Image (cartoon, grey):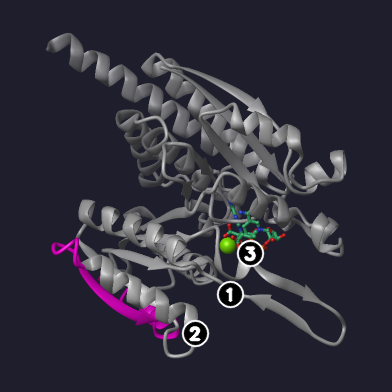
């Protein structure tokens, strides 16, 4: 297959981790006989510096001409004092909105070889396998009015029925493919938008009798994520709650550096990015963990290109490298044992290449 991928490295560690993921995708292309065309474009602070715009038209055009987008991260102290329209984060919100990427999938799965780094007791963490389905193009992030003066400030939490219905349906579809359990997380004891959210979840669940639904409040959910994370299958929630709960859930698995994400719309086009940000304090040192971006690339292969075997090849290689005890600094026991971003990526690449050898040996016996 031939596919076009727009690569938006962004800021901080973004360029380091996207470079790693592109290298892995190139190896996958070679091993499985595909052609991936990569076109790089700017977003975030990088785009502000070059074009005075966190999401230039040229970047949108490159993404529109692509089958999927791979993004690193945006933001950093350099742009923190900029006016709102020139904040790197605006570029990220704008690209999500422009492409109508309403469904943000954030899988959180315990990796046995990382459990030593989790602050949770091993018996609590080891069975964790959840999918956070976060609404991504509505809610507080986009509601108008939204502005501030020195005397006051306003943000607006707005959800339309249609916006809620489509994310609720997505979460039911995913629950049917998993353990059939949804925790729909809201703040219906206070927020009007959450009351409508609950009503729509209840309406929709009639069509999915095989799925069990529990409504949960976001405050106690954040506690249960720590005390009993294995109890969750699909967590369905709105934009802001999903942002916070996914960073919290990353702690269970050991590091924010291993959590991937996919942002999808109704068709197969998607944007793939790590859950983490631009980590400015470690940027340029070559020590960032590229696993989250490499695993996001695997999600791209699965959801945008329908390449399941290729996605599994990456996921297996990442697991094997962790099992071998190879870690970047965020997960290593000591600085001496830590691999650089490049060294760790090379291990994943070698692993994929050795899978190819064992597969061809297998094939020669069939
Ligand atoms: N999707 C995105 O582009 C995105 C997401 C979150 C934050 N941000 C932006 O990133 C900037 C920094 O935000 P922050 O510090 O709150 O969050 P962050 O996710 O960048 O970092 C949080 C912590 O995790 C560590 N970390 C994150 N990714 C890592 C990796 N791959 N390897 C090793 N360690 C890693 C960092 O060093 C830091 O200690 C802000 O400007 C924020 O707006 C962007
Ligand atoms: C950078 C920020 C706008 C973004 C968000 O809140 O969605 C980030 O935290 C994320 O999780 O992707
Ligand atoms: Mg976040």
Ligand 3: quadrant of the figure: bottom right
Residue wearing tag 3: 142
Q: Residue at x 57, y 38 (%)?
A: 70
Q: In this view, does 244 lie above or below 294?
A: below
- In primary-sequence order, the first of circles 2 and 1 is 1
Foreground pick, 338 / 175: 175
The disc placed on residue 157 is 1
Between the residue at mark 2 and the residue at mark 3, the CA separation in whole angstroms equals 17 Å
Name the side, left or right, on which 203 lies relative to 49: left
Instruction: Please provide percent x and percent y for residue 356.
Output: 33, 20
**213 inside magenta stretch:** yes
- In primary-sequence order, the first of circles 3 and 1 is 3
Name the side, left or right, on which 241 lies relative to 108: right
Foreground pick, 117 / 317: 317
Q: Quadrant of residue 17?
A: top right
Residue wearing tag 2: 191
Instruction: Please provide percent x and percent y for residue 6.
Output: 60, 31
- Tag 3, which secondary structure? loop
Q: Residues within 10 Å of mark 2 (few under 14, many from 20)?
A: few
The quadrant of the picture occupied by the N terminus is top left
How many labels sit on residues? 3
Q: Which residue is drawn at 83% across and 57% down?
A: 79
């Amino acid at each position: 297959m031939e596919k076009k991928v727009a690569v938006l490295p962004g800021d901080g560690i973004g360029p380091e981790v996207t470079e790693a993921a592109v290298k892995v995708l190139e190896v996958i292309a070679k091993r499985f006989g595909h052609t991936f065309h990569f076109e790089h474009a700017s977003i975030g602070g990088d785009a502000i510096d070059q074009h005075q715009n966190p999401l230039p038209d040229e970047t949108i055009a490159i993404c529109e001409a692509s089958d999927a987008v791979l993004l690193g991260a945006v933001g950093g102290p350099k742009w923190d004092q900029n006016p709102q329209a020139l904040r790197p984060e605006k570029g990220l919100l704008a690209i999500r909105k422009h492409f109508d990427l309403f469904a943000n999938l954030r899988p959180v799965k315990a990796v046995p070889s990382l459990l030593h780094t989790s602050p949770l007791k091993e018996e609590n963490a080891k069975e964790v396998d959840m999918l956070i389905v976060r609404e991504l193009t509505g809610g507080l992030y986009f509601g108008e009015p939204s502005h501030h003066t020195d005397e006051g400030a306003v943000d607006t939490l707005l959800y339309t029925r249609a916006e809620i219905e489509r994310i609720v349906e997505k979460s039911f579809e995913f629950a049917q493919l998993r353990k059939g359990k949804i925790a729909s997380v809201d703040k219906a004891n206070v927020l009007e938008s959450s009351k409508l959210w609950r009503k729509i979840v209840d309406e929709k669940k009639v069509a999915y009798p095989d799925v069990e639904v529990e409504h949960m409040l976001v405050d106690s959910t954040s506690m249960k994520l720590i005390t009993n994370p294995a109890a969750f299958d699909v967590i369905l929630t709105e934009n802001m709650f999903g942002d916070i709960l996914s960073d919290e859930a990353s702690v269970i698995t050991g590091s924010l550096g291993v959590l991937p994400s996919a942002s999808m719309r109704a068709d197969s086009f998607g944007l793939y990015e790590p859950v983490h940000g631009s980590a400015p304090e470690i940027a340029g040192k070559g020590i960032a963990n590229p696993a989250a971006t490499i695993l996001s690339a695997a999600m791209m292969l699965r959801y945008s290109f329908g390449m399941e075997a290729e996605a599994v090849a990456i996921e297996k290689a990442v697991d094997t490298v962790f099992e071998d005890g190879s870690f970047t600094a965020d997960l290593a026991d000591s600085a001496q044992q830590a691999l650089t971003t490049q060294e760790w990526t090379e291990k994943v690449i070698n692993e994929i290449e050795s899978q190819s050898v064992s597969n061809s040996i297998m094939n020669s016996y069939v």
